[in-house]
Image (cartoon, rainbow, N blue to C red):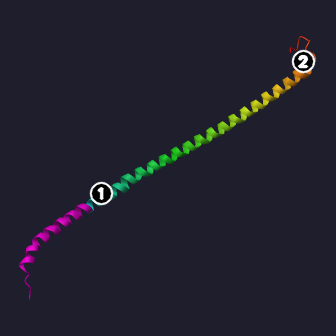
């Protein structure tokens, strides 16, 4: 024996079937869009991100190399400057001693001027 459904329940069957059909359609659309989104992410965005990161790594390496080269050149220039200053100071010392010891006692001679 089959039980008869009450009229109130029978009246809800149509709207429930329509709601389920709309839900199924929405779910199918959502599932398709999720698959498209997933494909876009893995096949388009990830490769672009990897390429950008590789470019950033190359730029970073280039900047580090340039910085290291600049630092090396700067230290070399500082060493050269210090050497030149030491040479000039030594030369000034030698000329001063020469002037004091050689020229001062003989300041009356024309070759050494006071």
Q: Nearer the N terminus, badge 2 or badge 1?
A: 1
- Under circle 2, the secondary element is helix
Percent position (x, y) of residue 29?
23, 61
Q: Which residue is mark 1?
A: 36
- Under circle 1, the secondary element is helix
The front one of 30 and 87 is 87
Q: Which residue is mark 2?
A: 103
Spatial distance from mark 2 to mark 1, Cα to Cα? 96 Å
Q: Does the magenta segment cover residue 48?
A: no
The residue positioned farthest toward the bottom in the image shown: 1
Residue placed at 65% from the left, 39% from the top?
72
The front one of 23 and 98 is 98
Q: Quadrant of residue 37?
A: bottom left
* Left or right relative to 43: residue 71: right
Residue placed at 25% from the left, 61% from the top?
30
The residue positioned farthest toward the left in the image shown: 7
Q: Are marks 2 and 1 in contact (CB under 8 Å)?
A: no
Q: Nearer the viewer, mark 2 or mark 1?
A: 2
Stretch of the chain drawn in magenta: 1-30
* Left or right relative to 58: residue 73: right
Q: Residues within 10 Å of mark 1 (few under 14, many from 20)?
A: few
Magenta stretch: dominant SS?
helix
* Left or right relative to 3: residue 45: right
Percent position (x, y) of residue 88?
78, 27
- Is 4 above or below relative to 56? below
* Left or right relative to 81: residue 26: left
- Is 92 above or below relative to 53? above
Q: Quadrant of residue 1?
A: bottom left
Residue placed at 33% from the left, 57% from the top?
39
Percent position (x, y) of residue 80?
72, 33
Q: Does the magenta segment cover residue 29?
A: yes
């Amino acid at each position: 024996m089959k039980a008869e459904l009450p009229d109130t329940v029978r009246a809800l069957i149509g709207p429930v079937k329509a709601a389920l059909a709309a839900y199924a359609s929405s779910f199918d659309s959502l599932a398709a869009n999720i698959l498209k989104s997933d494909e876009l992410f893995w096949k388009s965005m990830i490769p672009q991100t990897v390429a950008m990161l590789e470019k950033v790594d190359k730029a970073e390496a280039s900047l580090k190399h340039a910085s290291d080269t600049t630092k090396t050149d700067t230290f070399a220039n500082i060493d050269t400057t210090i050497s030149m200053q030491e040479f000039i100071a030594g030369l000034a010392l030698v000329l001063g001693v020469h002037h004091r010891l050689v020229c001062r006692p003989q300041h009356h001679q024309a070759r050494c001027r006071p």
